[in-house]
Amino acid sequence: MGLPSNGLLTRFSADILRPIPVGEVSAEVRTLRSGARIGLVEVQLRNEEHTLLSARCWVSRRAEVAIPRTPLGEAPTAGEVVVPDRWGGGYLRSVEWSWVEGIFHEPGPATVWTRALLPLLPDTPWRPVERVLLIADSGNGISAVADPRRVTFVNTDLTVHLVREPVGESIWMAASTALDPQGVGLASSTLGDRDGGIGTGAQSLFVAPTAGA
């Protein structure tokens, strides 16, 4: 028995074991729990020497249940598109950032609409859930409460819970960050699409003075 047919991803959790290089990596996938109603998959991202990331995904069957929808909040109004030039290129320039509240270089909570500008894989259309996971790891960045030139706040993990499948190309995130002088932190976010909130994200943060600061 395999995974639920046409199932819904309800939880994604990843532990970031090492920095992931820009280069060739491999993915090893195995099913930990199979079934017609729910299933659990484990994925390990590796290079030639190390396991770089370990992730688990819970998948639930789709069904029609006679209950009212209880969304996680209404979709915010789109804001101004700003290119985050002070934070470098790469990933940040591969996404369109439309700011509702806050901005990259201002400390504090932030809400932003996003849209991926490049394909995840060549000649492969985006899946809706992939758009959410692409953005979910940005919570600690958009809601930073410390200057990254002075304080490092790197996430060691990412957990995303979803209550339904997203729709459309644009995904919004409302995020906030809390740091503690003991050297730890937490970034929390609400994730959504044009129809409202669809889930939550959380990142544990390792906090330290930035080298050379």
Image (cartoon, rainbow, N blue to C red):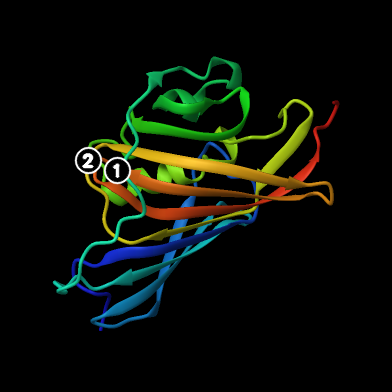
Residue topped by disc 2: 168
Give the x, y percent position of residue 84: 52, 20
**What amino acid type is highlighted by mark number 1?**
Asp
- N-terminal of the pair, mark 1 or mark 2, is 2
Q: Is residue 15 above or below residue 139?
A: below
Q: Secondary structure at mark 2?
A: loop
Q: Between 177 and 25, which is closer to the camera in this rendering?
A: 177
Give the x, y percent position of residue 56: 46, 66
At x 26%, y 42%, the residue is 126
Q: Is residue 141 above or below residue 49?
A: above
Q: Secondary structure at mark 1?
A: strand
Image quadrant in which you'd find residue 70: bottom left
- Closer to us: mark 1 or mark 2? 1
Looking at the image, do the residues carrying marks 1 and 2 touch, with CB atoms under 8 Å apart?
yes
**What amino acid type is highlighted by mark number 2?**
Gly
Query: Pointer 1: residues within 10 angstroms few (<14), some, or many (20+)?
Result: many
Q: Is residue 59 above or below residue 18?
A: below
Q: Which mark is residue 61?
A: none
Residue topped by disc 1: 193
Give the x, y percent position of residue 26: 46, 53
At x 68%, y 46%, the residue is 178
At x 25%, y 84%, the residue is 1
Q: Is residue 120 above or below residue 66?
A: above
- Is 21 positioned to the left or the right of 134 in the image? right
Tell me how far mark 1 sits from mark 2, CA to CA.
Answer: 7 Å
Q: Between 186 and 150, which is closer to the camera in this rendering?
A: 186
Image quadrant in which you'd find residue 176: top right
Circle count:
2
- Is 11 positioned to the left or the right of 51 in the image? left
- Is 93 positioned to the left or the right of 4 in the image? right
